Image (cartoon, rainbow, N blue to C red):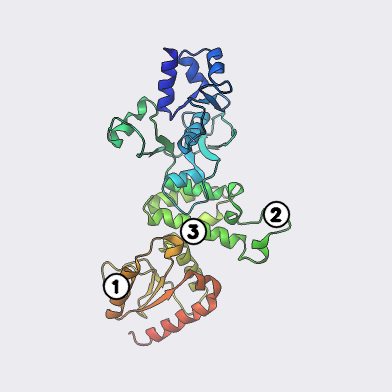
Amino acid sequence: MSRERALAVAKSQDGLITRKQALAAGLSPDAIRHAIRPGGPWSSVLPGLYSASNGPLTTIQRLRAAVLHSGEDALVTGAWGCDLAGLRYGPPAGDEVDVVVGWASGRRSLGFVRVHRARRRPEAQHWVDDTGIDDSGRPIADLLDSLDAGPAPGVIPVVSAAHAVVDTVVRTALLPPSWRPACARRDGCPDCWDGPGHRVLALRNVRALMCEVVQRRRTSLPVLRTEVAAAPHRGGALVRHAMRDIDAGCRSAPECELRDLVRTSRVLPEPRWNQALPGQRGIYPDACWERARLVAEVDSRSFHGFGDAPERTEQRRARYAALGWRVLPLSPARLRGEPQEVLREIESAYLSGGSVVP
């Protein structure tokens, strides 16, 4: 009977059970040791945490293990938090799982689990694996309502998408080299010598991720601003930089880079970013200068994945022409490879357009 109770607990936790839970279910220490013996039916995941099978852990089991190890208030954050929010431009979610716990928690990092204490505990949300949970067929909303009674398989507590994004990029020591604003090697590396530089690459990645979380409506601007405002001073410079671009209206990293370029000009004023075309509805150019009836569009579908299909792009540009607006298509490659030439083209188009508009 005690074995059945232990297995029921494990089933509700994606096949995992803690030592404390196994003992509470009635298993003796000897029974637990017997279950996790080499070749036995169970396996040890972390000290005091077991899998009720002896196969490799699935992704969901690794996430569950991180939460079980870290305590009842633990929430998945970091790269895995971004991944579970459906964001594609965060750093790779690898073997390590980051969780955030309350400041008073005594839990520590162990194995593949990285525990971070926070004075301001983020609001808990739940990621649901709706492909393999709850064989009873209950609606997911009912399943989430039942979580007060205990965990459910395939339901992982997580931070909000906005918190995951900010939490990820401010912990620079845990990020891949292309996400760090400074080189980790004393003697430098190819990105230092031949590339654009670590800060440029890191800012590009941070902008892409922060723009994505807004563009894909995983969060709202006020919520993201709140998370950025709460970011630590150390490691938070890039998120604050990117937030200024997003507040201005930019919605992709290449648009942010175009804004950087425009702000160096002595000719160009700040354009309208991703606002409705003046006097029109349903057309939102990347950037437009109303005085010159000039639109700049960054053809960056391959970079941020939010652009229209080619046919829709052609239709929109035909509509611009019919309304008397000129369009300058710009590629991210040109913005990065020949910025001054691009700037001269925009300035020339702006000045020639401004000369015929009252």
Please indicate, yes or no, whether residue 231 appears anywhere in the rendered image: no
Query: Is residue 189 toward the left or the right of residue 211 in the image?
Result: right
Q: Quadrant of residue 178?
A: bottom right
Residue on which disc 2 sits: 185
Looking at the rendered structure, the secondary structure element under dot 2 is loop
Determine whether 195 is above or below 41 in the image.
below
The residue closer to the viewer here, 265 or 153, is 153
Mark 3 or 2, closer to the camera: 2
Residue at 54% across, 44% down? 94
Residue on which disc 3 sits: 207
Residue at 49% across, 14% down? 27
**Circle 3 Cα neighbour tier, 10 Å, few/some/many (<14 / 14–19 / ≥20):** many
The residue closer to the viewer here, 22 or 72, is 22
Q: Are marks 2 and 1 in contact (CB under 8 Å)?
A: no
Please indicate, yes or no, whether residue 22 appears anywhere in the rendered image: yes
Residue type, numbered disc 1:
Gln
Residue on which disc 1 sits: 315
